Structure formats: C-alpha cells, structure tokens
Amino acid sequence: MKKLFIFCFMFLLLPPLCQARDFIVQFVEENYKETRSSFSYLPLIYHSIQVRSEAGPKLLVLKGDDYHYRKWLRQYIADDKAFIAKVPEDQADRFVSSNVFEIDVTNIHPFNLSLYRQGEEKSEKGMKPYEFKKNKEIQHTSRQEQDKKKAEKDRIEIEKKQQVKAQDKASQKKDQTKAAQKKQLEKEKLLKAQALQRSTEELKLKEELEKKKKEQDQLLSALAEQKAIEEQQRQEELEQRWLELKRRLLEDERIRALDQEARAQEIQRRWLELKQRFESE
C-alpha cells in the first residue's frame, strides 16, 4: 500500500516536470566553430543556427555534450531545412520574447516540413466544419496576439531608442554648451592676461624711459656744472695771467717811456694776444 501511494504521488509529480512546448522552426544559416582543449584535447564547440519561427527570427545556441547527435544533426541540415524545437513550458515565454535562446542539442528534432504540411491539410479536411473553423480561429487569434506583442515590443523599443537618442542629444548639447562656456572663459582669461601683460610692459617701459630721461638730465646737469666750473677756472686763470702780464708791462722800462695813450694801446694789444693764445690752448 505504501509503495502504491508513493507510485501515485510520483506519477502526479512527473507530468508537470516533463511538460514542454513544440515550436516549428525553419533553418536559415548555421554557425559552427570547433577547437581543442589545451590539456585534455576534448572538443570545444560553438554551434548556433539562425531560424525563422512563428515567434519571429531566432538564434538558437546549441548546448550539450552529445557529440554524435550534433554530428548527425549537422549532416541533416545539409538535406532539409525544418526542425521542431522542444522548449520547456517554463521557458516558452522567454523563447518567444528572446532573440537568442540556449537549448540542448538533443531538443532539436528534424522533420520533413512539406510532408508535415500535407498531413496538416489532410487533418483539416477530415475535421468537421465547426472544428476546422475553430482551429483556424485559434491559430489566427494566436498569431494576432503574437503580432500585437511584437508590435508593442517594437513600439517600446523604438520609444526607448528615441528617449536614449533625445537624452544623448541633450547631453551632447549640454556638453557643447559647457565646452563653449569653458572656451569663452579661457578666452577672457587669456585676454585679461594679455592686457595685464601689456599694461605691465607699458608701465615698465615708461619707468625705463623716465629713468633714462632722469639719468640724461642728471648727466647734462653734471656736464653743465662741470663746464661752468671749468669756465670759471679758465676765467680765473686768465685773470691771473692778465694780472701777471699787466704787472710785468707796468714794470717794463720801455712801456714806462711811452706816453699814457701809447701805453694804454700797448697794454690792450698785449691783452688781446694773451686772450687769443689762452683760448687757443
């Protein structure tokens, strides 16, 4: 009894764990790369196939270590272009909404799509009218819902892109404004520095000119004073020579023998000669 209870309990648990959804996909292109591990030399494989499905274009990344099944699957890809992908029920929504989906390689099952379509048409012909109509309505509704979801997703993505683009544009404009303001501030600083430098140079030049003028005035003043002193010394020396000459003339007996007028003329002549000789020296 206990074993029967356990068996029933396990039977109730197993179906939900084994539930999966089947998606028909059509092959577009294969991407395969195989290398060898450095130490164990086991194959390191990247294997993906691009497909078309009712949920839109997908990239199926094939995982798993079943090398023989993978090899057989690659051989089959060369002959036909359709597969059934078994997706766990809890991952079906992610499969529909994702562009890239990882799946075990053994969950990809090839089949003949044309024969499958013929069997589908036969099954539809064998249905009762209301059953066929109901099946078509279900398929149409499912496709409409998928189209709506896809359209809504595309609209959201477009809005996000537009928002990101607007934010990037605003950020770029803000950065340009900051750069322009920074450039203007740097230009103003440069102009102020140049004006200050010119003012400093002009002030320095003015001070140098004033200093040179002052030195020149001092030099001219010193030269004038020296010239005046030298002239005064020359005058004093001339007067001393004249006094000495006059004393000698007055002591000369020949001058004394002359009358007063002739004496005055001789003294005047001697004075002029002394003056000319002094100036020539």
Image (spheres, rainbow, N blue to C red):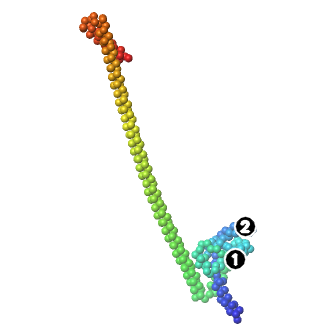
Label at residue 37: 2
Badge 2 density bin: few <14, some 14–19, many ≥20, Cα 10 Å: few
Q: Which residue is mark 1?
A: 106
Instruction: Provide the secondary structure element on which disc 2 rests.
Output: loop
Q: Is residue 12 above or below residue 182?
A: below
Q: Is residue 242 above or below residue 112?
A: above
43 or 73: nearer the viewer: 43
Q: Is residue 228 above or below residue 163?
A: above
Task: Name which residue lies at 29% across and 9% down.
Answer: 250
The C terminus is located in which quarter? top left
**Residue 178 spot, x, y in % from top left:** 45, 59
Residue type at the position of mark 1: Thr
**Residue 159 spot, x, y in % from top left:** 50, 70
Left or right of 133, for residue 34: right
Task: Name which residue lies at 72% across and 74% down.
Answer: 66
Task: Name which residue lies at 45% across and 54% down.
Answer: 183
Q: What is the CA distance from the residue labelled 1 to the residue labelled 2?
A: 23 Å
Task: Name which residue lies at 65% across and 75% down.
Answer: 103
The N terminus is located in which quarter? bottom right
Q: Residue furthest left?
A: 260
Q: Residue furthest bottom?
A: 1
21 or 81: nearer the viewer: 21
Of labels 1 and 2, earlier in sequence is 2
**Residue 219 visible in image:** yes
**Residue 237 spot, x, y in % from top left:** 34, 18
**Residue 149 spot, x, y in % from top left:** 54, 77
Determine which quarter of the picture holds residue 243.
top left
Q: How many marks?
A: 2
**Residue 269 visible in image:** no
28 or 41: nearer the viewer: 41
Left or right of 12, for residue 197: left
Instruction: Provide the secondary structure element on which disc 1 rests.
Output: helix
